[in-house]
Amino acid sequence: MRFLVFLLLGVTAPVMAQAPKLELPKLEVSVNRVDHDGQHMYEVDATGTVAAPLPKVWRILTGYDRMAEFVPEMESSKVLSRNGGEVIIEQFGVARFLFMSRTIHLIVRAVEQPMSSIDISLISGDMKHYESRWELVPIPETGGTKIIYHGKLLPNFYVPSLLGSKMVRNDIERMMNAVLARLDRRDAPKVEAIPQP
């Protein structure tokens, strides 16, 4: 479950006679365990902002083949097919619980509404149920982007009842911190080679 999702919330603060500057926000995540047909499902909500503009956020979040480069515990992510705004993705990752670890394999469907939302649903894999929705909202005042995430997941393997919500929350926070850091990273400018005499 360590590679299941991301995000956060920010504020702006003026700095003496300078343009407003976006402060790094604190992560806001809520995880609730709910009973569904006698099984424990986890509902995750997260919201926040990044300084990155909407087109950059969209490009990174829909760059599924590159997610393993910055999402902790994700070993690979590969687009199997694309048909317009519908994308089929295969992902491998590792879930760690206490002293155990388990390889996770998922095939999911992402339905994209460009620059607006991504709906993800499980096709097959090591979850009984997995669905999530990302919503992206531009923030004109700062040029940044507000990200809203909602997910529901039901693992296909044992998760301790008493610790489950806390473990899911810790993993989600770790994931989101990594993804948000990537969204706000300033890509190194390309340096042109200096011609040699």
Image (cartoon, helix red, strand yellow):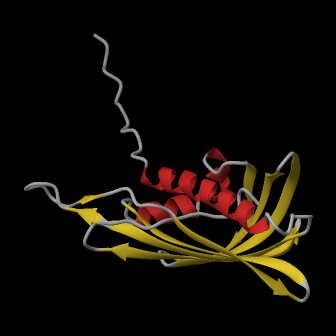
Front-lying residue, 90 or 31: 31
Front-lying residue, 4 or 82: 4
Residue at position x 37%, y 63% in the image? 53
Front-lying residue, 55 or 157: 157
Rendering quarter of residue 196: top left
Front-lying residue, 194 or 2: 2
Q: Position of residue 93 (x, y in %)?
A: 79, 52
Q: Assign the N terminus to one quadrant of the image.
A: bottom right
From where the camera sits, is residue 184 visible?
A: yes
Q: Residue furthest bottom?
A: 37
Q: Residue furthest left?
A: 17
Residue at position x 38%, y 56% in the image? 24
Rendering quarter of residue 154: bottom right
Q: Position of residue 197 (x, y in %)?
A: 28, 10
From where the camera sits, is residue 84 visible?
A: no
Residue at position x 71%, y 57% in the image? 3
Rendering quarter of residue 110: bottom right
Left or right placement of residue 63 versus residue 52 in this view: right
Q: Position of residue 190 (x, y in %)?
A: 38, 36
Q: Position of residue 128 (x, y in %)?
A: 88, 75
How many numbered badges does the structure rendering display? 0
Q: Residue furthest front?
A: 162
Left or right placement of residue 196 versus residue 149 in this view: left
Q: Is residue 160 above or below residue 101?
A: below
